[in-house]
C-alpha cells in the first residue's frame, strides 16, 4: 500500500445528498459523487467541421449554458460497471442524437482539484451519424448547437487541429440572460 495515496478510511463524511457527498480528508473539505464512478466528456466533430454542443439549464449557475456533451459513468442502475467508452457513446447519442463511427480517448483531467475528487475523461468523436433528435433525457431539456471549429479555435486561442486537449470546457453564459441558444450572435 502506497502511504501517499489516501485510503477511503481517511475520509470523514460531513453530509450526503442524493448524488453528492461532502467530505473531509486531512483538514480539506471537498465533494465527491456518490452515484457514479467517473465522468466522460465528448468533443464531437461533424464532417462539416462543426463541434456539436448542447445548451441546457444548469441550476448551480442559475441559467442555461452551452457545453460539450458529457455525463456520468456507472450512474444507471442496470449498468453500474459500464466502461468509459460505453458511457461516452451513450451520452453522445442521448444528448446530441449522434453516434460516432470513431471514438478516440484523448486524456483524463481534474477540473477543480481543490473542490472535488472528480476526474473527467475526454473523447474525440468523429464520423458522426445522426440517429435521433438529441436533447438529453427527460430531465435535461437540452438543445443541440453547432459551432464551427474555426470559431472555437478563435475563442479558445487554439490555432492547431492537434491541440484539442487544450480546450478543457467551453461554457457560454449570457450575462443576465437565461436564453442563450439561437439568440446568441457569435
Image (cartoon, rainbow, N blue to C red):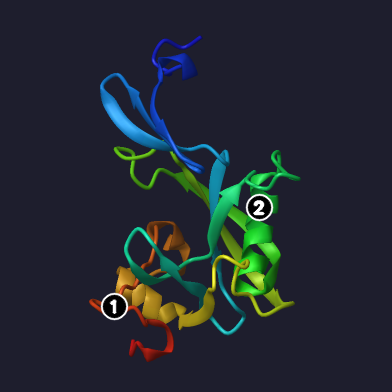
The residue positioned 41% from the left and 15% from the top of the image is 10
Q: Tell me the residue that label 1 is attached to.
A: 174
Q: Tell me the residue that label 2 is attached to.
A: 87
Mark 1: which secondary structure? Answer: loop
Foreground residue, 98 or 74?
Answer: 74
Q: Position of residue 66 (x, y in %)?
A: 42, 72
The residue positioned 60% from the left and 78% from the top of the image is 46
Q: Position of residue 8 (x, y in %)?
A: 48, 19
Q: Which of marks 1 and 2 is nearer the N terminus?
A: 2
Q: Residue 138 carries which label?
A: none
Give the quarter of the image for residue 95.
bottom right
Specify few, some or many for label 1: CA neighbours under 10 Å numbering under 14, 14-19, or 20 or more: some
Q: How far apart are marks 1 and 2 (CA)?
A: 30 Å
Specify few, some or many for label 2: CA neighbours under 10 Å numbering under 14, 14-19, or 20 or more: many
Side (left or right) of 114 relative to 47: left
Indicate the quadrant containing the C terminus: top left, top right, bottom left or bottom right.
bottom left
> Do the residues under discs 1 and 2 have CB atoms within 8 angstroms?
no
Q: Number of numbered discs present?
A: 2
The correct choice, above or below, for 47 with respect to 103 in the image is below
Foreground residue, 138 or 112?
Answer: 138
The correct choice, above or below, for 101 with respect to 31 in the image is below
The residue positioned 63% from the left and 61% from the top of the image is 91
Give the quarter of the image for residue 62.
bottom left
Front tag of 1 and 2: 1
Q: Position of residue 64 (x, y in %)?
A: 39, 72
Amino acid at each position: 500500500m502506497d502511504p501517499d495515496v489516501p485510503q477511503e478510511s481517511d475520509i470523514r463524511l460531513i453530509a450526503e445528498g442524493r448524488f453528492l457527498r461532502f467530505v473531509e480528508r486531512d483538514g480539506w473539505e471537498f465533494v465527491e459523487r456518490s452515484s457514479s464512478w467517473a465522468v466522460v466528456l465528448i468533443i464531437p466533430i461533424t464532417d462539416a467541421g462543426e463541434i456539436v454542443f448542447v445548451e441546457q439549464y444548469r441550476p448551480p449557475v442559475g441559467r442555461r449554458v452551452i457545453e460539450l456533451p458529457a455525463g456520468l459513468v456507472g450512474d444507471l442502475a442496470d449498468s453500474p460497471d459500464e466502461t468509459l467508452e460505453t458511457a461516452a457513446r451513450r451520452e453522445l447519442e442521448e444528448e446530441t442524437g449522434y453516434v460516432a463511427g470513431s471514438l478516440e480517448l484523448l486524456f483524463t483531467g481534474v477540473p477543480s482539484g481543490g473542490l472535488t475528487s472528480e476526474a473527467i475523461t475526454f473523447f474525440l468523436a468523429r464520423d458522426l451519424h445522426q440517429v435521433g433528435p438529441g436533447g438529453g433525457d427527460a430531465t435535461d431539456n437540452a438543445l443541440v448547437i453547432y459551432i464551427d471549429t474555426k470559431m472555437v479555435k478563435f475563442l479558445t486561442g487554439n490555432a492547431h487541429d492537434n491541440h484539442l486537449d487544450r480546450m478543457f470546457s467551453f461554457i457560454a453564459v449570457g450575462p443576465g440572460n437565461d436564453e442563450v441558444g439561437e439568440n446568441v450572435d457569435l
